[in-house]
Amino acid sequence: MMLMRWYAERRNVAVKMKYSLTDWAEKIVRERDEKSRRMDVQTSHYYTYYVLDGDRNAEVDLNARKCTCNVFQLDQLPCTHALAAARKVGMPRYELASQFYTTEALIAAYAEAIFLVDHVDFWNTPEEVSQLNVLPPIMRPPSGMPRKTRILSQGEQKMKKKCGRCKGTGHNRKTCKKPIPMRSNIKS
C-alpha cells in the first residue's frame, strides 16, 4: 500500500512540473546561471572556451560536456563555467543537462503501476517451491577485534575468578550461592 501511494504521489508531482528539468535540477541550474553572469568567456576552439571567474578559471568543452572544475562531469548538470560558455554561444542551458534530470525521465520512472499483493491464501505457489526449506545465509563473523580471550604468554597463567563476598574462587560476587556472612559490628 505504501509503495502504491508513493508512486501515485510522485507521479502526480512529476506531471505538474512546469520546466523541462525537474524542479530540483532547475533550481540548481538557475543558481549556477546567476553566478555565471559575472564571468568572462574567451573562445579557445570551436566548442572549447576558457572561462575567467576570478577565483578559479576553467576550460570548458561544450561538445564533450567537460569542464576542468569537474563539477560538470560529476553532477551531469552544467557548472557555472559551462553556463557562461553556453550563454556566449547562445546554447540553451537545458541542452547541457543529462537526460536523467528531465521531467520526462521522472515521469517514466514512476509510470509503472504498483499493484496490491493478495492474501497468502490466494497465492498460486508451485508444489516444488512450497516444499523447499529455505535456510538463512551463512554468515561470516564480522571484521574487527575478536571476542575470544587473548592467547597467554609463555609462563603466564589464567587468572581465576575470586568472589568479593565469600573470597572463594571460580565464581564472582554476582553468581555467589553461599549465604552472606554476618559481621559483628557490636563492640563490647
Image: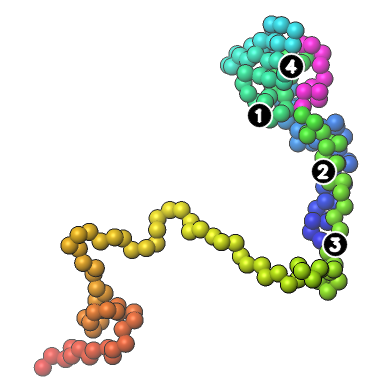
Q: Which of marks 2 and 4 is nearer the N terminus?
A: 4
- Label 1 vs label 3: CA separation? 38 Å
Residue at 66%, 10% in the rendered image = 50
Looking at the rendered structure, the secondary structure element under dot 3 is: loop
Q: In this view, does 71 lie to the left or right of 106?
A: left
Residue denoted by label 1: 74
Q: Earlier in the sequence, mark 2 or mark 3?
A: 2
Q: Which residue lies furthest to the left in this view?
A: 188
Q: Is residue 33 left or right of residue 151?
A: right
How does the figure colour the protein chain or chains?
rainbow
Residue denoted by label 3: 116
For residue 85: magenta?
no
The quadrant of the image that shows the N terminus is bottom right
Could you tell me the amino acid type at mark 4?
Answer: Leu
Residue denoted by label 2: 109
- Label 2 vs label 1: CA separation? 22 Å
Q: Residues within 10 Å of mark 3 (few under 14, many from 20)?
A: few
Could you tell me the amino acid type at mark 2?
Answer: Ala
- Percent x, y of residue 39: 68, 13
Could you tell me the amino acid type at mark 1?
Answer: Leu
Residue denoted by label 4: 62
Q: Which of marks 2 and 1 is nearer the N terminus?
A: 1
